[in-house]
Amino acid sequence: MEKLLDITVGQLLEQTAQKYPTHQAVKYIEMEFDKTYYELNNKVDRIAKGLLGMGINKGDHVAVWATNYPQWLILLFATAKIGAVLVTVNTSYKEAELEYILKQSDSKALFICDGLKDVDCEKAIYSVCPELKTCKKGKLESKTLPRLKIVVSMDNWYNGMYNWNEIEDFGILIEDDEYQKAKESVMPDDVVNMQYTSGTTGFPKGVMLTHKNIVNNGLSIGDCMAFTEKDRLCIPVPFFHCFGLVLAIMASVTHGTTMVPLLWYTPMKVMHTIEYEKCTAVHGVPTMFIGMLEHRDFERYDYSSLRTGIMAGSPCPIKVMQDVIDKMNMKEITIAYGQTEASPVCTQTTIHDSVERRVETVGKTLPFMETKIVDPETGKELPVGVSGEFCVRGYNVMKGYYNLPEATQAAIDKDGWLHTGDMASVDEHGYYRITGRIKDMIIRGGENLFPKEIEDMIYTFEPVSDVQIVAVPDEKYGEEACAFIILKKGCTATEKDIKKYVMDRMARHKVPKYVIFTDSFPLTASGKIQKFKMREQAIEILGLEKTDFIHSN
């Protein structure tokens, strides 16, 4: 990456379509949708004109609550071309969460699908806005959501809602020169997307990301994987999350790479898609890769086409990384680290890094950004090898949290540094290691315990499939470590076995006081492990409610 691109997301698609007009841009295997870059750009233009005809203009907020539909992809580029802001809604959200997001984001339009796993979108939106059942399409007057005017279904025909197939008809109302003026009014520093943070503490916050943020981050990410137009990326991660939107879609379109999205993840679908579509890359969080590696049919599939991809989203177990390299032929897999507020990737390994670097670090700082490690208490920059808070500054830092100026000021200091809340260290060669969250760090009798260090050790115990360490309250030491463990199918282990394994290999104070065996971890829809929920579960299971009360006041 020689310089930052000063273009919009819409201009990016147009440039790629000009460069690779006949090259396959996107191919779905679960539905009929197969487009070249020229065809995709054409379809986006028709939908963009239709949105203008419907009354969606520059600066309007457009929410999308759907799985990885082709319409989602088209909507991303169509809103970008006319300067509207796409508000991505987590597919695991329920009715109250949807209402909160639509209200906090001031969304004017909402696009929904029928394909969510355990949520009835139609029922949910009618419940939040009962006026929708009797209003004219595009003329919603809601007491609860006064800004929301337009609801569109990507699937069926419902009272008060437009159907996706009607959008292009509205394009007739827009002259070509009017559409061209709308496109020309969009600037690279305009907000293009609002991503809502997972809300592990408090209410979710709307992270405002610009065209410049995500285009350039996508370019850097693709460069680290040496993406070209010859690559084919399987995308099982959700579009609504930065993993899908930036690490997958933007990384692909900046390089002319073919996208092969799945509506949602299942191990079988991913394995089938890799073989059937001869994918050269696949993205996933560690739990996704573990799901494939341990699937009973794993060895029946051919992974010889695979070359690279990204494992990210939560700390990556060294053993899982090694298995993916050895058993899935992903010799050039990379690790990325970042957060939504940084649009999102700050550091990444490259295909040229050694296996050791790619399994033990999260790589070096991406081009055109600065990073540093500071003491969380004093803000003073720390030397090589000392763990502290990871901070980043550059083109990639968000514009801020929507309508939350105080929260923005708390995250970005006066000098423009984004304080991530993540603990990390950097070595003399510039490679970063993530050691945990500041609030995840366990302080046991004055000793700082970093969950990832203990997790990585327990991962090497043969019967263990997955492990997460959380802090639980303790009257004597203030906090103790509690290990949640998923065992491999057919394997057995006891609490005593786990503790002895750690005791034989680590300092005594790092041995988890508690071990809880489980079948699964609580996850967000994007696959991130919700440690705060695990902590709540542990406190209840272990009967530490009274202790927690003592130590939280």
Image: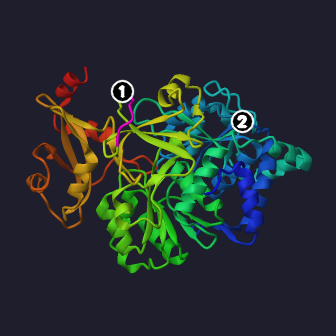
Q: Amino acid at mark 2?
A: Asp
The numbered mark, 1 or 2, whose residue comes first in the sequence reads 2
Magenta stretch: dominant SS?
A: loop
**Residue 226 image offset from top left, x and y in percent:** 55, 67
**Residue 355 image offset from top left, x and y in percent:** 37, 67
Q: Does residue 53 appear in this view?
A: no
The image quadrant of residue 541 is: top left
> Where does the magenta region start and end?
377-383
Camera-near label (1 vs 2) is: 1
Q: Which residue is mark 1?
A: 378
* 549 in relation to 7, above or below: above
Please rate how many residues cluster around mark 2, counting C-alpha atoms within 10 Å: few if below 14, some from 14 to 19, many from 20. some
Q: Amino acid at mark 1?
A: Thr
Locate the N terminus and report the quarter of the image it occupies: bottom right
**Residue 56 image offset from top left, x and y in percent:** 76, 39
Q: Which residue is mark 2?
A: 60
Membership of 317 in magenta stretch: no
* 533 in relation to 263, above or below: above
* Residue at (79% x, 42% y) in the render: 54
* Residue at (50% x, 33% y) in the render: 96
The image quadrant of residue 552 is: top left
Q: CA distance from mark 1 to mark 2?
A: 41 Å
- Where disc 1 sits, the SS reads loop
